[in-house]
Image (spheres, rainbow, N blue to C red):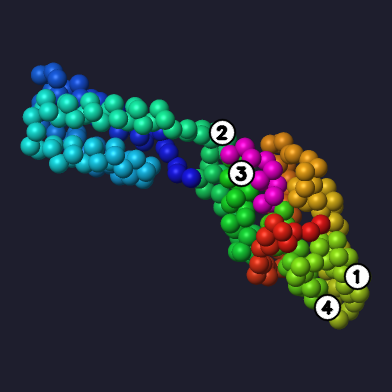
Amino acid sequence: MLRFYAAKFTGLISNMMWCYMACFTMGEPEQKIRQTLRETLPEMRNELRRMEFPLLASQTERLIKGVDILSREQLGVLITELRDGIRETFGQQVFLKLNYDYRAGYVRPQPNPIVADAFPDIVPEFEDATRSIALEQPNGAVFHSMRVLEAGLTSVAAKFGVETGHRNWENIINDIESAIRGMNKSWGANWKEEQQFYSDAALHFRTLKNAWRNYVMHLHHRYSPNEAIKIYHHVSDFMLMLSQKITGTPVEMKSQEDVQE
């Protein structure tokens, strides 16, 4: 998906249209018109290329080459052709406007840096969840949030030597809880505190699995934007809590066919 910043492009169009009007009046110095075109057209050409409008970019390139050799009337004609081309081409496009509150999350969707350091493999999932919220795709946001949660589950399982490969969450959580109940003094002086921490974490995994994960993998429920935001923040806070104790185990993300409850 291409990013289109309307303010920037509108500024370029405004400069070009000023040149167009100036070309057909005698009130503006010709040198000022040419200098404005020299400053505006290369950036416009680059933007049109980036937006994958090669014909418009080629038209702009013709103007760039003619800035110093064409008459002001000839420049005005080429600007008119480019203006009409932009109008026609843009009229055939669909542009999505991001909600102002979510714009920053789409452009810079980084997770909490503590979580990113502890679980670097899930940064792309955090980013996809954030962008799904910005694009008002709540089911996508919940789906990617659950993939983030899967990385946390995998890391806790590794802490207790629990196998996770091609196993469903229910069995993994059961084995983790069994291992937690078996903790003793061999875990260190603070083993009871550790046991409580991981007991709470396992309970949290089970709660989230039953409340959200099972549903997002099937057609039981479609999430509202507010529900997705709530789930996203809940998972983010939980992963931040996990980051205080463990770091991520490299996760091989499963395909849709491999996912089980």
Could you tell me how far apart the alpha carbons at marks 2 and 1 are, in whole angstroms? 46 Å
Left or right: where does residue 196 sit relative to residue 35? right
Q: Report helix, strand or loop for mark 3.
A: helix
Residue 99, labelled with which disc?
Answer: 2
Left or right: where does residue 248 sit relative to residue 96? right
Give the percent coordinates (x, y) of residue 172: 83, 66
The magenta region covers: 135-145
Residue named by callout 3 = 132
Could you tell me how far apart the alpha carbons at marks 3 and 4 are, in whole angstroms? 43 Å
**Depth check, front residue: 188 or 109:** 109
Is label 2 in contact with label 1 (beta carbons under 8 Å)? no
Name the residue at 17% across, 22% down: 22
Could you tell me how far apart the alpha carbons at marks 1 and 3 are, in whole angstroms? 36 Å
Could you tell me how far apart the alpha carbons at marks 2 and 4 are, in whole angstroms? 50 Å
Tell me the kind of residue under disc 3: Ser
Left or right: where does residue 4 sit relative to residue 170? left
Residue named by callout 4 = 188
Instruction: Give the number of the mark in front: 1 or 4.
Output: 1
Instruction: Give the number of the mark in front: 3 or 4.
Output: 3
Question: As displayed, is residue 160 above or below residue 76?
Answer: below
Give the percent coordinates (x, y) of residue 130: 61, 46
